Amino acid sequence: MDSYSTKNFQSMKFETKTIHAGVHPDELTGAVMTPIYQTSTYAQSGPGDHKGFEYARGHNLTRDVLQNNLASLENGLGAVCFGSGLAAMDAIIKLFKSGDEIIGSNDLYGGSYRQLRAVYAGFGIESKFLNLVNPEILHEAISDKTKLIWIESPSNPLLQILDIKRICEIAHSKGVKVCVDNTFATPYLQQPLDLGADIVMHSATKYLGGHSDVIHGCVVCKHQEDLDRLSFIQNASGAVPGPMDCFLILRGIKTLHVRVERACDNAEAMTAFLLQHEKIGRVYYPGLQNHPGHELAKNQMNRFGGIVSFELASDSMDDVHEVLKHTKIFALAESLGGVESLMTHPSSMTHGSIPREERLKAGLKDGLIRLSVGIEHQEDLIQDIENALSVI
């Protein structure tokens, strides 16, 4: 068993860790794939006399293997899995108490904004959202109440790049922790714990699962105190994923590097197409040399990701709706990171819970379209968008 433990894969390349870290053949049968332990409870020889498993809310071997694998991918101490990305975020916010403050970046997933403003504000946890492209503003923004900085990089949906290392330096100098939502980048492209972050969170529904067939979330920790507390919250609050969900994420992770490489290739090709098209206004992609965060992205990411956002030159909402209705390959749907290409209208879909004035202040216009570029043939994807643009 020990020869397959996570610690023995710390020196391995990422591609090897996706397949092997924390994973080992089943001891009973030798099954190469981790079995789905579909059980709610475990037999005990006597009260408290068990094999490390009592009740499946607290421990499930399929989930344990996934948690070990995730910790290795993010170079963390340990990981804790949940029933969704927002359940993972919920557990992190439960580390704090009434009167504490969380500073979030101003361009972030609408569900994250909603949880902070519409749920935890009611429990006395305050939040404010700032443009952290210039991290130096944190010197003045952080107060005695501030306990956590919550950031996304690349951000959703404007693909801002934040200086994770500098944000962590400033936050830590004031005794504040940093959590990075690494969903867009994945651990293949970016590892925030190595850049100084204390906690990394994923909506594993997206790239980690990769096949749009499971809802899942996870948290990876650098510090034992956070890991212990989040493990307690996982069991005490009970927002755990089922063993089948964990199996699907484990299976998806095995091809993470292959899928993300192809998505990056396709996103770069799509960006080049959009830039030269007369009906396209602004294109958002950190791989562009004129992107404000391009050089920073080159330093803290391996590649620039599979998400591209754009605005039409016409700035017409009627044109936006026509484009959204006339693709054949790109499905109009919430979510991202699957093998199939998706398109989203953030202001009415993923970010609809953010008040319009707040969206506009952050730079999120009503006409913005976000593409999650999948792994289909790039010529087909480009032709699909070109066909949709031809109707306006």
Image: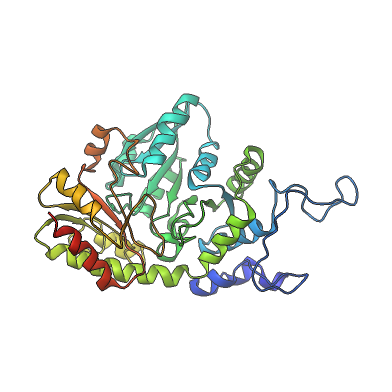
In the foreground, 132 or 383: 383
Report x, y in % for residue 257. Answer: 44, 70
Q: Which colour scheme is used?
A: rainbow
Report x, y in % for residue 230. Answer: 60, 44
Q: Is there any visible trace of residue 13 in the rendered image?
A: no
Q: Is residue 74 left or right of residue 140?
A: right
Give the mark count.
0
Quadrant where the image shows the C terminus: bottom left
Q: Is there any visible trace of residue 147 in the rendered image?
A: yes
Q: Where is residue 1, by image quadrant?
A: bottom right
Q: In this view, does 350 lie to the left or right of 76?
A: left
Report x, y in % for residue 346. Answer: 29, 45
Q: Is residue 368 above or below residue 96?
A: below
Report x, y in % for residue 145. Answer: 44, 30
Residue at point 58%, 55% (across, down): 245
In the foreground, 147 or 85: 85
Q: Where is residue 258, by image quadrant?
A: bottom left
In the foreground, 372 or 159: 372
Query: Which residue occupies the extreme right position in the image?
Result: 46
Q: Where is residue 272, by image quadrant?
A: bottom left
Residue at point 58%, 63% (across, down): 69
